[in-house]
Each structure stands twice: as structure tokens, then as C-alpha cells.
Image (spheres, rainbow, N blue to C red):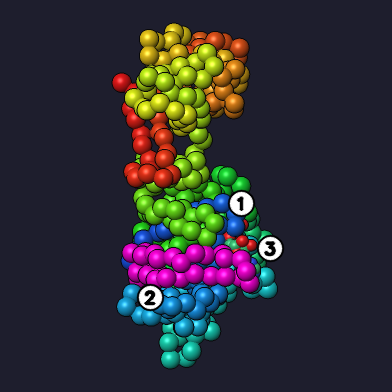
Amino acid sequence: MSIRLENISKHFGSTQALEPVNLDIHEGELVGLLGPSGSGKTTLLRIIAGLENADRTTPPGRILFGERDVTRVHVRDRRIGFVFQHYALFRHMSVYDNVAFGLTVMPRKERPSSGEIRARVFRLLEMVQLEHLAKRYPAQLSGGQQQRVSLARALAVKPDVLLLDEPFGALDAKVRQDLRRWLRRLHSELNFTSVFVTHDQEEALELSDRVVVMSNGRIEQIDTPDTLYRAPRNRFVFEFLGDVNHLEGSVHNGVLTCGNAYLNVDLPNGAEELLLRPHEVRLAEQPSDTCHLPVVVTAISPVGAEVRVELEADWLAKPWLATVRHADFERLEMKRGQHLYAHPRQWHRFNEHALPAAQATRVA
Ligand SMILES: Nc1ncnc2c1ncn2[C@@H]1O[C@H](COP(=O)(O)OP(=O)(O)OP(=O)(O)O)[C@@H](O)[C@H]1O
């Protein structure tokens, strides 16, 4: 089921929670709404759900599920499944009864037979690998297990659309990882359309087919994770999606200078700020003719696929972060207090007034 929002906005009193938004979500897509606190993610999700009404505007805002205009359709008639951060399972019901609940309360005409209900509930419990816990009560389950029951319960009624509000927010990192995999797998097996809210960049990028990045009630960019990361439309998106190093200085005759540091750049004279991701900083023992950025290693974190190195210098207002391959780390025999030279592989620059807003330049 595709979802289309046309000219949807929302005020709470004098607070504008959403500026007029247009959004197309394709059938079968898993879309993440990502943004800082207060950016309007939950409001947008609740409007899609029908838990909140959009402002009355001219032209009127519309919400379409497929061809069906659901703008004024009650939440219970929108064929939506919900999963919230706080499990909201019925505490007095077993796991089985929780998952079966939505089916047992269907109007008699639509309600599956008790045999069909049983088969569907067990099939879902099997998919989330909890069939052996069918008789337990929510209080006897871990947080991650409760969230898997919530997922199964939401999917039991075969919703057209699954909406999830920070579904894994209250869980620890490892359990979050597992649950992301569950959701991804269920999504491809059962083929529904999902929208989930998160403020976790990694979660949004890992899970979503496309991510809607929001700030201050506005949609800043809608794109695939890869495009968002590689071609952010503006500075907000760039900074929100990962660690960023800043290089501020002034350009004169093709050289950007900042204290005793300099870098050749093909830019006009004037004040400049260049931005670099940690993986775009190469470290070496020597400067070059075109790049002299002396730094001191102040912290090293060797955990993970790459080594994270913190760098400081007089000419830097804030420390830089570089990610270094373990092989390079060993070759340079890196240690705290070591003097090295940073060499940008690539840098980015944003000019909010001119198009294209983002410029990425590879350093030869
Ligand atoms: N019921 C309400 N009454 C008044 N203001 C509200 C209400 N709900 C949301 N807001 C305001 O609308 C704006 C957007 O809120 P929303 O909850 O959608 O943001 P969010 O991005 O989901 O934030 P968070 O990540 O903190 O949940 C905020 O300024 C918030 O204070």
C-alpha cells in the first residue's frame, strides 16, 4: 500500500510542529523518519496513523493510502499496525492471547475461524521465534522479547501499513541490532509498507529503504541511505548523519590558511569552512607541498573494524576525529602524543545561498 501526504501541516497552539509537507512512500517500502528531538517525526507519524488531525488548510491537506483518501478516516478503519517504544502489551494476557487479540475482536463477518486464528498466531510466533513462550505473560519476558511480541501482534491483522514509534528505543545496543534484523526480515517476507520514527542515525541508515531527514518541522531531504550520506543536500543533513571535522580559515590566492596550517584549494579569496568525515582524513608522518596540517594524537580507540583517532592542534577550535585502517595504524606505530600530518582525501563545503548547495571535492 503506498502512502501519499499532500500539503500536511500541524500547529499545536502557536507552535508549528510541521510545516506543509508532501511525501510519497511507495508500496512495500520501509521508510525511516529521522531527526533531532522536536523535529516533528512523531507528529508526522501520528497524522499518518489518524491519531492526530492535520491543520485545515487551503488547499486542503490530504492523506492517501493507495487510491483511498483516508484524511478523514478514523484510525481503527485505516488498517494500520502499531508498535510503540513502551511495549504496551496487555499484561493480563498470555503471549498467545496478545498476538491473537486483534483477530478475536474483529467483527464476526471478518473474523477468521478459531483454527485459522491459531494457525496465524503460531506462524507469527514462529517468525519471531517465540512459539515456545506462547503461554508466558509479558512480565516474564525480556524487553526484546516483548518487542517481538508487539511486532507479531501488530502484524496479526495483516495491516496494509505498519507504523513504529522509536520501537527499539528502550533496548540495549545488541538487542536493538537483533530486532532491526527481525523487522527487516519480516518486512521482506510479508511485504507491507512501514514507517518508523527514530533519532538514531545508524538505525535509520541501516534499516530504511529511504530516510526522511527532518528538522524544525521541515523535511530536509528524502533519499536512500547511500545518497543521503554521499550527497547530503545541505549542511544540516551532512552534520546530522555522522561525525564531522571542521577546517576554518581564509583563502588567499588558492591557499587556505589557519594559524600555521595551510591547504591548497581551488576556491575564491575570503573566509571558508571545509567539512570532512573521519574517513576522509589520512594521516602521514610528513606534510606535502600542498598540504601542511600538523596534528597531535590525543586519544586512540582501537575497537572495531577501524581505529578511531582523536587529533588536536593549535589551529583547530575543536579536536578532529580520524578513522584509520588497522594496517595503517600499525605501520605508523601510532601512540598518544605523536606528531603527525593530516591530509584530506576529500572535503565538503556548503553554501546555503547558492545552488548546488553542497560541494564535495576530492583532493588529488
Ligand atoms: N500535543 C502537543 N501539544 C503541544 N505541542 C506539541 C504536542 N505534540 C508535539 N508538540 C510540539 O511539536 C513539535 C514536534 O514534536 P514531535 O513530538 O513531533 O517531535 P519529535 O521529532 O517526534 O521529537 P522526539 O524525538 O523528542 O519525540 C515540538 O516542538 C513539540 O513540543
> Closer to us: mark 2 or mark 3?
2
The residue at 63%/54% (across/down) is 170
Q: Is residue 99 left or right of residue 221?
A: right
Amino acid type, label 3: Ala
At 40% from the left and 33% from the top, the residue drawn is 348
x, y percent for residue 202? 49, 45
Q: Quadrant of residue 226?
A: top left
Q: Which amino acid type is marked by label 2?
A: Leu
Q: Tell me the SS state at disc 1.
A: loop
Assign the C terminus to one quadrant of the image.
top left
Circle 2: element type? strand
Residue 177 located within the stretch drawn in magenta:
no
Q: Which residue is identified by label 2?
A: 64
The answer, for residue 132, to whether it is visible in the render is: no
Q: Which mark is residue 140?
A: none
Left or right side of 89 for 306: left
Look at discs 2 and 1 and give the one toward the viewer: 2
Quarter of the rendering containing residue 318: top right
Range of magenta residues: 1-26
Earlier-in-chain disc, 3 versus 1: 3
Q: Which residue is mark 1?
A: 171
